[in-house]
């Protein structure tokens, strides 16, 4: 991926130990889209831990999708009061530059897409942290994987996740890392479109199985949105040989079925809330091939 020398976003907030800080400088409906509503987790654990935690909560009779609500923390208690984190000293390491560059490119892409329909795209800040950090969705821990928090409309990433992605999930490559960011930005786009708020309202009356099924559609739409960004990146000449394969492999490696097989040796389809490996790969590819959000209406799709 040719990312060096490109614009870097000012919307990166760095709260890592030894890191620096770069402060950040209703729903839309785009033509051709008929998005009815959806939802998304409000905070997250690492991929493997999330599956295990979800199974435990399910066995205890607790709906793991409470984590979708921006007003719920990881312990399931209401009205988490956010603490203001202390920013650490300045650092311009390469990984931070990479994240800021990818974020900037997603900003350019979604600004263009929204503008084409007469709407304004408001970028999401991306927060880098290590160990733990409070958010409007509860505490992000050292084990947290990337997540989008609708409560403060920010993306949270512990960069140690990328090492886990390479080593534990066998998904190396800079474009695989970029896909992770683009997926979370996809959730922000859903938030701006009113999809996440709508699902967070609807899911209160849903059964756990229905909530899981709806969550799968939301996650696959975010994958498709990430694919749309990838198509724009390709048009700009950013992609290199093998980049698309890196993203598709990452989508496969973090499918619910693949993760469950890796973690526990068997799958529990009714607990899926992100989609199978085949589904995640398929919807990223659909967005990439079409280069348009019109291809991403997973909420109305008869088959996933």
Image (cartoon, rainbow, N blue to C red):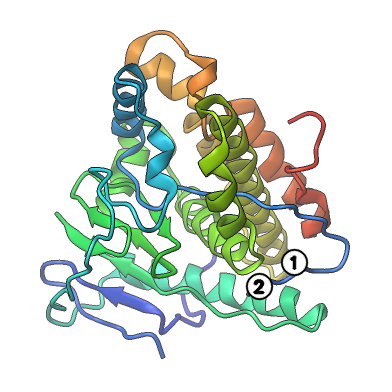
Instruction: Please state which of residues 203 and 130 is positioned toward the viewer in this rendering.
Output: 203
- Above or below — where is 142 with respect to 122? above
Spot occupied by residue 123 in the image (x, y as percentages of width and height): 53, 77
Residue occupying image coordinates x 33% and y 33%: 50
Number of residues whose C-alpha sits closer than 10 Å to that of mark 2, classed few (under 14), some (14–19) or many (20 or more): many
Spot occupied by residue 247 in the image (x, y as percentages of width and height): 56, 44
Instruction: Please state which of residues 75 and 127 is positioned toward the viewer in this rendering.
Output: 75
Q: Which residue is mark 2?
A: 110
Image check: 148 left or right of 275?
left
**Mark in the foreground, 2 or 1:** 2
Q: Which residue is mark 1?
A: 235
> Can residue 158 be seen from the camera position used here?
no
Q: Label 2 to label 1, Cα distance in Å?
A: 14 Å
Q: Quadrant of the N terminus?
A: bottom right
> Can residue 295 be seen from the camera position used here?
yes
Secondary structure of the residue carrying tag 2 is: helix
Q: Earlier in the sequence, mark 2 or mark 1?
A: 2
Residue occupying image coordinates x 68% and y 67%: 237
Q: Quadrant of the C terminus?
A: top right
Image check: 264 left or right of 116?
left
Instruction: Please state which of residues 147 and 299 is positioned toward the viewer in this rendering.
Output: 299
């Amino acid at each position: 991926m040719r990312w060096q020398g490109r614009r870097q976003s000012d919307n990166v907030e760095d709260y890592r130990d030894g890191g620096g800080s770069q402060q950040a400088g209703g729903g839309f409906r785009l033509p051709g889209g008929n998005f009815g509503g959806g939802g998304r987790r409000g905070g997250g654990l690492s991929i493997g831990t999330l599956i295990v935690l979800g199974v435990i909560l399910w066995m205890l009779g607790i709906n793991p999708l409470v984590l979708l609500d921006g007003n719920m923390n990881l312990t399931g208690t209401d009205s988490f009061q956010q603490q203001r984190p202390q920013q650490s000293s300045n650092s311009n390491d390469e990984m931070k530059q990479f994240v800021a560059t990818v974020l900037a490119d997603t900003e350019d892409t979604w600004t263009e897409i929204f503008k084409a329909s007469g709407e304004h795209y408001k970028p999401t800040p991306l927060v880098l942290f290590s160990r733990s950090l409070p958010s409007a969705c509860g505490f992000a821990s050292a084990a947290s994987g990337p997540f989008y928090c609708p409560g403060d409309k920010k993306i949270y990433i512990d960069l140690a996740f990328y090492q886990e992605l390479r080593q534990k999930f066998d998904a190396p490559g800079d474009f695989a890392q970029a896909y992770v960011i683009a997926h979370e930005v996809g959730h922000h786009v859903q938030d701006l479109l009113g999809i996440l708020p709508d699902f967070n309202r609807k899911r209160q009356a849903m059964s756990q199985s229905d909530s899981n099924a709806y969550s799968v559609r939301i996650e696959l739409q975010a994958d498709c949105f990430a694919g749309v960004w990838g198509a724009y990146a390709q048009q700009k000449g950013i992609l290199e040989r093998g980049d698309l394969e890196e993203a598709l492999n990452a989508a496969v490696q973090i499918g619910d079925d693949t993760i469950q097989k890796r973690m526990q040796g068997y799958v529990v389809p009714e607990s899926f809330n992100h989609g199978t490996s085949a589904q995640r790969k398929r919807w990223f590819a659909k967005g990439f091939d079409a280069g348009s959000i019109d291809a991403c209406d997973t909420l109305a799709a008869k088959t996933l």
